[in-house]
Image: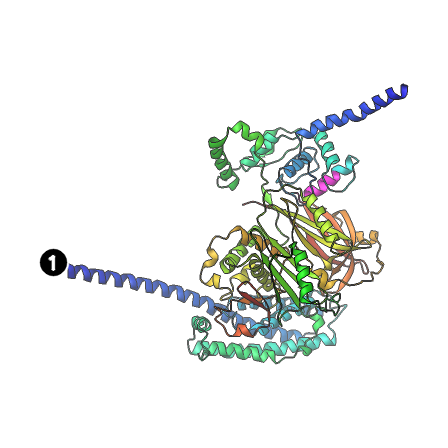
Amino acid sequence: MFRWILISLLSLTVVGVSVWGYQEHQEKNAILIQAENDYQRSFHDLTYYMDLLHDKIGSSLAMNSREQLSPQLAEIWRITSLAHSNVGQLPLTLLPFNKTEEFLSQMGDFSYKAAVRDLEKKPLTNDELQTFEALYEMSSDIESELRKVQNMVLNENLRWMDVQLALVNNDEQADNTIIDGFKTVEKTVEGYSEGKINASMMGTSSKKDGYSMLGSDKITEDEAVTKMRRLFDLDKSAEIHVSKTGDGANVPLISASFQDENRSGYADITQYGGYPITLMINREVNESKISLHEATNKAKDYLAGKDFGELALIESNQYDHVGVFHFVPNQGDVWIYPDAIQIKVALDDGDILGFVAKDYVENHRERTIEEPEVSEEEARTKVNPNLKIQEHHLAIIEDDTGEEVLVYVFLGTLGNDTYKIYINAASGKEERVEKLKQAEIKY
Amino acid sequence: MNYLKIGVIAFLLLTIPFFFAEKNQVDAFTDQVIQHGATGEDVIELQARLQYLGFYNGEIDGVFGWGTYWALRNFQYEFGLEIDGLAGEGTKQKLAAASEYDRQFVKQQIQSGNRFSHYGGVDNKKQSQQNTNQNRPAEQNNQQNQGNQQQTQTPAENDTVAELEPTAVNVPQGFSQNDIKLMANAVYGEARGEPYEGQVAVAAVILNRVESPTFPNTVSGVIFEPRAFTAVSDGQIWLTPNDTARRAVLDAINGWDPTGEATYYFNPNTATSGWIWSRPQIKQIGKHIFCM
């Protein structure tokens, strides 16, 4: 009797568990399929957009009238951004798929710049046409390779989830058609030399060689340690840990960190010249005791001791109990925006909690500043007349192509919003308009 | 003798207004200089007083933004003060003398999360819009505060002691509080065991990726890119981040980048991809190696 009860109980349990297990399995499958479908959609969308892109580039190469070319370029720009967002949704981060993404962003930059330009007055130059043609060829190769992969995916019912698994398990031997396919795409694109593509049209590669102030004298380890101690405000007994950057760094640095009971810190200085780039001190900051204004003065005093020359405050903000300030050098009443310095001050006792001089060290050099060709009154007329101009100064900024230009900066209001307008001091062109941020409601 | 008399009278004449001003000073503002970007009760009072005189038309939210800045400068211009956009001693005295500040009213409005204004010569009832949404945090805070009051002190005492909290916060240009929160989640999930600079570094990598042409162009796009961050894949991103992670994110947004412009990083002990080792390495911070 007892045995029978036990047997029936057990079998009931077994049935129950299997039903539960089956349901779990079903649910898991449903979720997997959903994730898979997501990947599939992104992938097929990507190939579709590459197709479309190829066609559009091709037809715009054949176009003659400017009225047609500009909208077409805008369309290309839109498609590149759609394709780019689809690439971002595929699990390719661990795959070298950079070149293709780079192609998309280059194509985007190129078409955008050409589209917003008045092609009637400034038609595409020969260089630019060559770039355009090179991009066309690239798009054709990427398109056909992607088509091949797509064909395989459809014929053999390949699943992106397997790509995920293969990437996670890092199975070198695993023969995964999708991964191989994408590697081929990447190789094809890699074949294009940078030379074919006119860098000046791209914006991405126009980064000029910076760090001209560093000089060629390497500092010794001992000098570095002394400098670091001074930065951290530590005495000789404190232990600091020093290391050097590897091959990937675009400028060789020495880094140091320390950790004591209630403070820790990190700093970078350049190996050549020993200029400080970053300083970070981390500690608990208590209730604010000093005002943001007092903190500004502390920050100014601190930077004055660091040989940055005369500085102008462009932004000050209080976040909880720290103040963060942005300074730019002020060279004969011209504010040099590319050489910005950020500094952070604790509002409980006014200690400096860190600063960043990377932009300063990278961009700073002796500049000869031209006299503005456009007078201030003339520049004012270039600003939207609805805007009420409140303040102005002269400044050097980097324009969209990364070139430094002299501009008038006007701060003005329109309704309750404040705008910063940059008017080129040589040509009177409106270089940029920024809406300055408002405080956000606490949620 | 006459000279002495004149001297005494002149002295009195000079100091008497000073005394009055001093008296005014007692119930207006603290003695700090208020500048652009500051937050706190002094800013609430500054905005309320500027609004009383009709210089300021924005929200009274306790954050010294551009609107407050221009209002203050206009006030300084109209009252013949030095126009520097700083609320210093002289400006505050002039302002306190020229305007009124109904702290009780402002406090009540802020605590119940109402939209309100503080114009002079207008009935208070007309200046407040009842907050109908019961779930506003201000409201909840208020309720909590009231609960605390009953335990610790009588409401009457509290009215004069407790400092008014601003209803808004500063956010870096181009980012919202939610962007910061999302990044703090990612940083906490990825690097909560790391030293502070290691957490700033992870946040900086996210921002470097947003800038890079080979990655998505938004913070959320970068964070949720499949397989980009392990914390996203295994759900650790949904842990509640601590304050350190949040501060690290703010530092990174404000320009601190200890990585030297890295766009990749990995933990050499747990890295699953051989490819990542082929990237040119920049430096190691904590357990992570950062590379281009």
On the image, the x and y values in percent for residue A414 come to 70, 46
Q: Residue at x 29, y 63 (%)?
A: A21
Image quarter hosting the N terminus of chain B? top right
Locate residue B119: give its quadrant: top right
Question: Is residue A3 rendered to the left or right of residue B47?
Answer: left
Residue A224 visible somewhere in the drawing: yes
Color style of the picture:
rainbow
Find residue A379 and report its horizontal and vertical position in percent.
80, 54
Predominant SS along the magenta part:
helix
Q: Secondary structure at mark 1?
A: helix
A20 sits left or right of A279 in the view: left
Point out residue B126 in the picture as x, y percentages from the top left corner: 60, 31
| Quarter of the image where one finds residue A360 | bottom right
| Magenta stretch holds residue B65 | yes
Residue reaching furthest right?
B2
- Residue type, numbered disc 1: Phe
Q: Which residues are magenta?
A: B64-74
Q: Residue at position x 73%, y 76% from top?
A: A127
Relative to A111, is B8 on the left or the right?
Answer: right
Residue at image coords 57%, 59%: B203
Task: Judge whether A55 appears above or below B132 on screen.
Answer: below
* Side (left or right) of A63 relative to B77: left
Image quadrant in which you'd find residue A87: bottom right
Chain for disc number 1 = A
Residue in front for this viewpoint, A42 or A359 = A359
Across and down, in percent, residue A77 comes to 63, 67
Furthest-left residue in this view: A1
The residue wearing badge 1 is A2
Identify which residue, B145 or B288, lies in the foreground: B288
